[in-house]
Amino acid sequence: MRHRSLVILTSVLTTGALTLTACGSRNDNKGGGSSGKTEVIIGVDAPLTGQNSATGLGIQGGVQVAVDDANKNNLVPGVTFKVQALDDKAIPASGQQNATQLVNNDKVLGVVGPLNSGVATQMQQVFATANLVEISPSNTAPELTQGKNWQTKKVRPFKTYFRTATTDALQGGFAADYAYNTLKKKNVFVVDDKQTYGAGLAKLFTAGFTKAGGKVAGTDHVNTGDTDFSALVTKIKNSKADLVYYGGQYDESEKLTKQLKDGGAKVPLFGGDGMFSDTYIQTAGKTAEGDLATSVGQPVDTLASAQDFIKKYKAAGLKGDYGTYGGYSYDAATAIIKAIGNVVKDGKIPSDARAQIVDQVGKTKFDGVAGPVAFDQYGDTTNKQLTVYQVTNGKWKAVKSGTFNG
Amino acid sequence: MSGIGPVEPAGHVEAHTEDDSDARPDAPQPDVIGTDSPRLTDRWHTLTPRTRTTVLATAAATLAAAVWLLAAPPPTTPPKEPSTPWPSTTTAFHYKGVADPPATASTRDFRFDVSVHDGPPVTVWDINAAPAGVHTSTTPPTAFTVRAGTTHHITVRITVTHCSGLPLNVNLPFLDVTLRNTHAIQHYSFIFGDRYSRDLSELLHTACDATRALPSPHVQPEVRVLTMWTRRVPAKPAESDLPPSSPSTTS
């Protein structure tokens, strides 16, 4: 009797303990394989230190929030997602090394990034060879999706490459129209940083501005990492330009605008999404007042869908500027996670999972935090929104937003 | 019990109960280390059969309830009331083509579909074809309201009033509109692709190619219409809500 009772009691307690353990592990985000779930990695490639790191960290943070949400909501049963973020330092060769590292890890089933179009050009082939899907939240160079001859004949170069940001073909034209028709500027001095993104954007702005009737008062180039622009300032002042357009990143333009204004040239500096960062204003201070930048998407504070994302980002104490690409990064990661959910069932990863995921991403359609998420036949986003911002009282203020319905 | 520690003198006798048939008074007593309180099993054996049955039943019921609670889907928090979307996020303009025949050489009618896919009704307060040198009017006239799930077919009449400085080859033509719903008033641009660009450029060339040779800006009679239009603006109640330099603002 004593033994029988002990056996019953022990059985009941043991069963209960095991059951509680099993149930408790379902939402364990950190357990990975130890919790009985399959660990899947979403890779991130972006500049996390040095040049452009404010926006790069915003990309990493956006992906982290998406992965946390997916794990919390058990979006893909049997799978625990993790983020592996690699620093490309905005250097194309580093991006390529990172791409190789990511494709060699079987747990990586999708990658978000990179930030820079020039870095992307060195990563696309690596991902394509491995059938690993890549979604950039920020690349805007048209040739990445539509080929080198995109203006005459669009050809998609890599089926594994997608992006949630719209292209410079729209951004450059949108900025040119605003400069000519709204700001009433007629003479522009165009500067670029000789990079894929910067030079391409400057070229497209120039084409749109001159087509509208504006004139180019002068052109020049800078190198990434330059800090002394005194010679360029003199050139701009002598050109009598009423606007300076800069194709490049905030790292150089924030110094250029300060030296320009300090040098007595009271003309606004206008740039693209690479310049749209709070760091630009922090560094340039009052000299940034009146400067302008276009950026992809609508202001996040006008998107009801983005409010929850912003709250989570801030609550998590994540670094970086979420305002530029954070929402698009969240949507890019979610597109990959949803595609994985259609391929990986009960934690079982098929041998051709990566190829299947590429196909599934192409069929993406959902309402993301930054708007509807879907891709066209080139891998470009179908959500083609742009906004012109102007520095007003020390903050970027949206002055014009538009949607392309081509 | 196991562990490291001093061996205490034996002296404690395991408690027996009347029902403990396995207990043998003459059996050798086990060594007891320390002065622990009675173990669970010790306590268990002091219970009557009825009490044990009750305890077991209660434990089983509690365990079953715990398993059921933990295995059930996590409680869903009541869905948050969705915040009202901004009008630009729910409204779409699609270009449908040129209406035939052209009204005059300097005027053409362009057809658009305006739809609202979600949220509260959106009132289109104003539509403007943006470039200086053209005048815009619509049929039906603004303001008109579009409800969610519906599409309005509208015609935008564009009349060239000034050729000087007017870009004849339009790259990314757009309509500037003012939208309003219960959440906000927004100035917003809907940008259109090749088809509208081609049709609009054709109008601009037709109207201005001949006049570009003239020494001074050519002003057509329609400029009077533009003046009248400008006077109408302050009469619109919503316009007074708009800041002069900001394209979007909450209401």
Image (tube, rainbow, N blue to C red):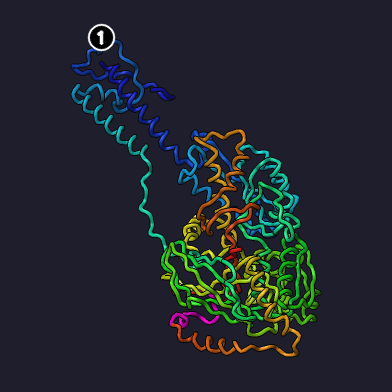
The magenta stretch is: B237-248
Q: Which residue is mark 1?
A: B26
The amino acid on which the numbered mark 1 sits, given as a three-letter code, is: Asp
Q: Is residue B244 magenta?
A: yes
Please name the residue shown 29% across and 19% down the image.
B11
* Chain letter for the residue marked with disc 1 in the picture: B
In the picture provided, is A206 more to the left or to the right than A288? Answer: right
Residue A228 pos. (x, y %): 77, 70
- Between A251 and B14, the one nearer to me in the picture: A251
Toward which corner of the image does residue A395 lie, by quadrant?
Answer: bottom right
Vertical position of residue A49 compared to residue A30: above or below: below
Residue A395 visible, this orientation: no
Residue A198 pos. (x, y %): 73, 64
In the picture provided, is A168 more to the left or to the right than A1? Answer: right
Label 1, secondary structure: give it: loop
Toward which corner of the image does residue B17 lie, by quadrant?
Answer: top left
Residue A284 pos. (x, y %): 66, 72
Please name the residue shown 19% across and 16% down the image.
B19
- Between A389 and B37, the one nearer to me in the picture: A389
Please name the residue shown 48% across and 76% down the image.
B140
